[in-house]
Structure formats: structure tokens, C-alpha cells
Image: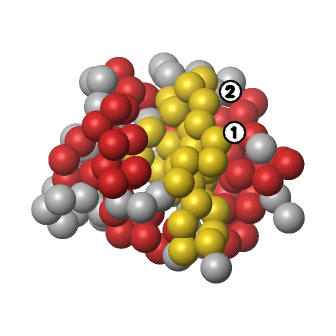
Amino acid sequence: MSQHTFAIIKPDAVSAKYSGQIIDIIEKNGFKIVKMQKLQFTKKQAEQFYDIHKERPFFKELVDFIISSFSIIMVLEKENAIADWRKLMGATDPLKADVGTIRKMFGKNIGNNATHGSDGEETAKKEIGQFYPELVK
């Protein structure tokens, strides 16, 4: 059974012009891109998106980074989409990410790590629902 996950190509990767390469990798790994949009998060959207981290010391840094420039948001579909996308992205820290993962190839550090992916089914529903409520069952 296919599953949806939410993915972001973050401002660092978009401004470095890696978006096309990342999208190519996504498609070559069997994901269907159900929705895709280039946008600049508003502060309100970013605060809502990172709401789970609002009590953490790095919350402001996350918000400031994601609103700094354009991102590409996507809904990806595939069997085991959440786990497969997380594996394809690699570890949060690009220095610890496996060779061949997106973060190893395009990330610079923990803050500028090129991509985001939902960490579970509930998170995916929440994240997809923020931008594409019609896709959430």
C-alpha cells in the first residue's frame, strides 16, 4: 500500500541550485511527486510547521533559516514512503550521513542539511495538512 510523506528542499539547497538534482534522485528512487511547490515560508507558516520544537533553544534559528529564502515543498508517494525518504535523505548531520544520501551529497552541516522529511505517519499528516489539507484522510 502506498504512503505519503512530506519533503522539503530547504533554502540552502535551493539557493545552491541543487533542486533539480535532488528531484531527479527522488524520482529515480521510485517516489511519485504528488504535489510540488516553490515558496518562501512566512514567519507564521514556519512557526506552525516547527511548532513541535517551540520550547527548544534552536526554535528561532529553525524559523529564521526556513524563512530566509525559497524552499520547495513536496508530497511524495511510494510504498514505505516515510522510511524510504528518511533513508534516502541520510543522517541529520551530513558529516555522519552515509555515502550516496542526499544530505551527504548536498548538506553542509546540521543546520544547512538540504532536506526535511516527516519522521512518522502523524507528523506526515500534520505537515501535509498544513499545505495540502485535501490530501489528508
Count of numbered marks: 2
SS at mark 1 in the image: helix
Which image quarter holds the C terminus?
Answer: bottom right
- Mark 2: which amino acid? Lys
Residue pictured at 35% horizontal, 60% vertical: 29
Residue 61 location, x and y as percent?
A: 49, 37
Give the CA separation, mark 1 to mark 2. Answer: 6 Å
- The answer to whether the residues at label 1 and label 2 have Cβ atoms under 8 Å apart is yes
Judged left or right of residue 72, residue 114 is left
Q: Is residue 85 above or below residue 47?
A: below
Residue pictured at 63% horizontal, 48% vertical: 34
In the rendered structure, find residue 43 and report the number of the disc placed on it.
2
Identify the residue under disc 1: 47
Judged left or right of residue 81, residue 133 is right
Residue 70 location, x and y as percent?
A: 50, 22
Q: Is residue 132 above or below residue 135?
A: above
- Mark 1: which amino acid? Glu
Judged left or right of residue 121, residue 129 is right
Q: From this viewpoint, which residue is outermost toward the left?
A: 99
Q: Name the residue nearer the viewer: 24 or 137.
A: 24
Q: Name the residue nearer the viewer: 114 or 80.
A: 80
Q: From this viewpoint, which residue is outermost toward the bottom?
A: 1
SS at mark 2 in the image: helix
Residue pictured at 38% horizontal, 27% vertical: 14
Residue pictured at 56% horizontal, 26% vertical: 38
Q: Name the residue nearer the viewer: 98 or 4.
A: 4
Q: Is residue 95 above or below residue 50?
A: below
Q: Is residue 11 visible?
A: yes
Mark 1 Cα shell of 10 Å, populated few (<14), some (14-19), many (≥20): many
